Image (cartoon, grey):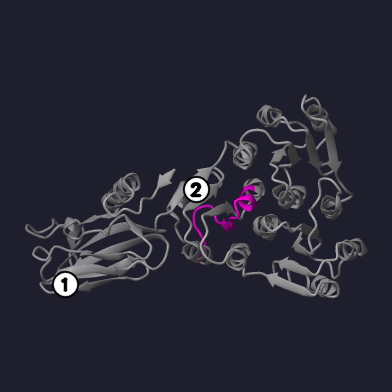
Amino acid sequence: MIQISPSPATRRAPLVALMTVAAIAIGSVFATPLTASATPATTPVPAGTPDVGLTYCAPAIVELGSAVDFDASDSEQTSGFTVTISEGSLPDGLTIRPVTGLAYRISGTAAKLGAFRYTMHFTNGIHSGDRTCAVDVVPVGSKVERIAGDDRYATGLAVAGRVDPDTAPLVYVASGENYPDALSAAAIAAQRGAPLILTPRSSIPESVYGAIYKYAPRDIVVVGGTNAVSTSVETLLRAIPSVSSITRIGGADRFEVSRNLITHPTFGAKPSAAVSVVTGNRFPDALSATPPSGRDTIPVLLVNGDASSLTANEKSLLTTREVTSATLFGGEDTVSTGIANDIKKIAATVNRIDGSDRFVTSANVAKSAYPGHIDTVYLATGENFPDALSGGVLAAIEKAPILLTRRTCMASEVADEVRALTPKRIVLLGGQNVLDATLENLPVCS
């Protein structure tokens, strides 16, 4: 866990120490001895030539919006030298400029989150040198933490422990090997304050079984048919002493499972005149849709987004529930125009939230559903589904968005949304094989 303190005097002591060591290490690796630019590299460096240590790196950690103003060079030893940024870039909002006495200063206000690498090159026309530096711009006062386990099932249990750390009268169980059934269940589980536990199809890991046993649930809902969660898993769950009922909600395909989950009289969606519509053919947009839908007790309906129209059963569901408002997640290549037009014949208000890719869509969902400042933001990989499936329930209960990211960096639109939300906590979902350790410094993809 990385704690970022807002106090200027003690600001991020562990983090600064860590990043300063990293910056020094980077400088040691990349800093090159001065060479005469017009002579071969094997020629000895002339005596008295200033060394690369006379240019100075910016602080390793800078808070977003904070002012930076420091000497980038030694005014005496680099007299007559010109200092420029030859590779990479300074953080947005910072510039390097000469000042009286031929020193150079880096100053300005850090205006964009991210990990920045830059090389300062200084030369007097005869001799030259380089120093490579690293600086990370992080949110003001944010705490970056991680919820993770050794695999998707362990991560799911770690998340479930945040949903309900003790007992849980109701538990939803779905496949961790495929996403559709859990996508349908996540928003409903959040509505009912119940953990969503992932399991392999044909067996249940001891750790997963032990966690469910500890919850001592009265009711367990198994989501999906036996091709998703086998009868042998169901049999094991029935053996838990506290369990009085096991309810399987399945269907002929993922779309029928979604409808049956929504309409189940006991464990389905609570009454709502709104619906969230996502494609069941791909997972990313549904991951973004789960937190705001679960927060607002809105069911998530999976449809065949590539189809040219709603099915008769889908039209019947919307009509029976007297839906007046629908939000489509993803562009027309994700949920077709034909489906949108059919929904408009039933619901008075139909909105669509999309973006140029899954990452931008997640940022646009957060922008639409979470105006203003919030306490927590969750970051999950947009390249796979399991960690965000479990995390969607927790995010919904905590009224927090899930923003999708690459393994090692955030899209600029995602970083902009993190900045706009100014969260107190930024939580990474999944281990370092899913979200790299470098992501804890919130780098922005180049």
Question: Circle 2 sits in a helix, a strand or a loop, which is it?
Answer: loop
Does residue 405 belong to the magenta stretch?
A: yes
Q: Quadrant of the N terminus?
A: top left
Residue found farthest to the front:
271
Q: Is residue 114 above or below residue 264?
A: below
Residue 226 in sight from this viewpoint: no
Image coordinates of residue 2 in percent, x first then y, are 41, 46
| Mark 1 surroundings within 10 Å by alpha-carbon count, few (fewer than 14), some (14 through 19), many (20 or more) | few
Q: Are marks 2 and 1 in contact (CB under 8 Å)?
A: no
Q: Residue at x 77, y 63 (%)?
A: 275
| Mark 2 surroundings within 10 Å by alpha-carbon count, few (fewer than 14), some (14 through 19), many (20 or more) | some
Image coordinates of residue 60 in percent, x first then y, are 31, 54
N-terminal of the pair, mark 2 or mark 1, is 1
Q: Give whichever of 197, 337 is nearer the camera.
A: 197
Q: Is residue 238 above or below residue 345?
A: above
Question: Circle 1 sits in a helix, a strand or a loop, which is it?
Answer: loop
Q: Quadrant of residue 86?
A: bottom left
The mark found on residue 436 in the picture is 2
The amino acid at mark 2 is Asp
Q: Residue at x 69, y 59 (%)?
A: 296
The amino acid at mark 1 is Gly
**Stretch in magenta:** 394-412
Q: Give whichever of 193, 346 is nearer the camera.
A: 193
Q: Quadrant of residue 357?
A: bottom right
Q: CA distance from mark 2 to mark 1?
A: 42 Å
In the picture provided, is 290 more to the left or to the right than 98? right
Disc 2 or disc 1, which is closer to the eye?
2
Residue receiving disc 1: 125
Does residue 419 belong to the magenta stretch?
A: no
Residue 148 in sight from this viewpoint: yes
Image coordinates of residue 256 in percent, x first then y, are 87, 53
Image coordinates of residue 69 in percent, x first then y, are 24, 66
